[in-house]
Amino acid sequence: MPSPRVTSFFEEQERHLTRNVIAPQFATFVPLMDELYEAAFAARPVPMEAVVFQLLVLCHRAFLIAVSIIARGHPDDDACATRRALEMAKVAFAVSYNPANMAAWFAYEERSQRWQAREVGSKPKNRVFPPFDLPTEHPNLNAVGHWIGILSDSAVHFTPEYLDGYEFQRREHDYFLPYFVTNEDDLHRALRTCIACHIVILNLFNDALGGAFVRSEPWCRAMNAIGAANQSFNPEPPHSA
């Protein structure tokens, strides 16, 4: 059985989840993004490259995982799932853009060498991400790379920016840290970042599939609904005369 402290932590997570999922922004954006993914599944070309479809499903899973983590009061920990989804979208686009990128990504022998090096205590020499053949100027691909960099520096890797995100409380010689985030602005900021990343992800999948999503009325309707919801929660300030 878990210790009382661990049990208390789990119970507190569930209380945050129960409260946050019915908050206006969560109750609005999460169903809309889920609807956008469902419309993407329905709009996909059939047949399609199996790995691309698998990556699309995994990105939907990553979205649900990320928003559940945010709603549980840990908006700093959703970034790993979201960053991985961004990388999935990049792979999906790469193998659609040039089928030779598939072999470069799998690279069984090179990846096996990485694990063999670890087993003998050596540092793997090969890069995790291969040098894909990709267009140099592609707005959605560049946007994915932009978000991968932001999430890497701010939330995934242990950087000074990551440490600055925690507000430790000093009490004499001790430091205390609230394990749950209750500030609504922080929760909403994480949710909006997650939504923004998954919109970029789906836009890149759309490019990988030759524009299949934008030819779908349900997908376009869901995308427009997200834009309208974003406008309602974040109205632009009035322009001065």
Image: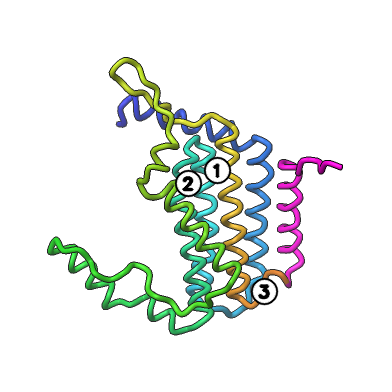
Give the residue number, with chain letter if any, for mark 1. Answer: 190
Asked if residue 195 is positioned above or below residue 3 in the image, the reply reads: below
Give the residue number, with chain letter if any, for mark 2. Answer: 78
Q: Residue at x 38, y 42 (%)?
A: 160
Residue 217 drawn in magenta = yes
Examine the residues drawn in magenta and state their main secondary structure: helix
Asked if residue 235 is positioned above or below residue 88 in the image, the reply reads: above
Q: Nearer the viewer, residue 152 or 75?
A: 152
First of labels 2, 3 by sequence position: 2
Q: Nearer the viewer, residue 73 or 145?
A: 145
- Whether residue 127 sits left or right of residue 165 in the image: it is left
10 Å neighbourhood of mark 1: few (<14), some, or many (≥20)?
many
Type of amino acid at the residue the image marks with label 2: Asp
Type of amino acid at the residue the image marks with label 3: Ala
Q: Residue at x 66, y 40 (%)?
A: 25
Nearest to the eye among marks 3 and 1: give it: 1
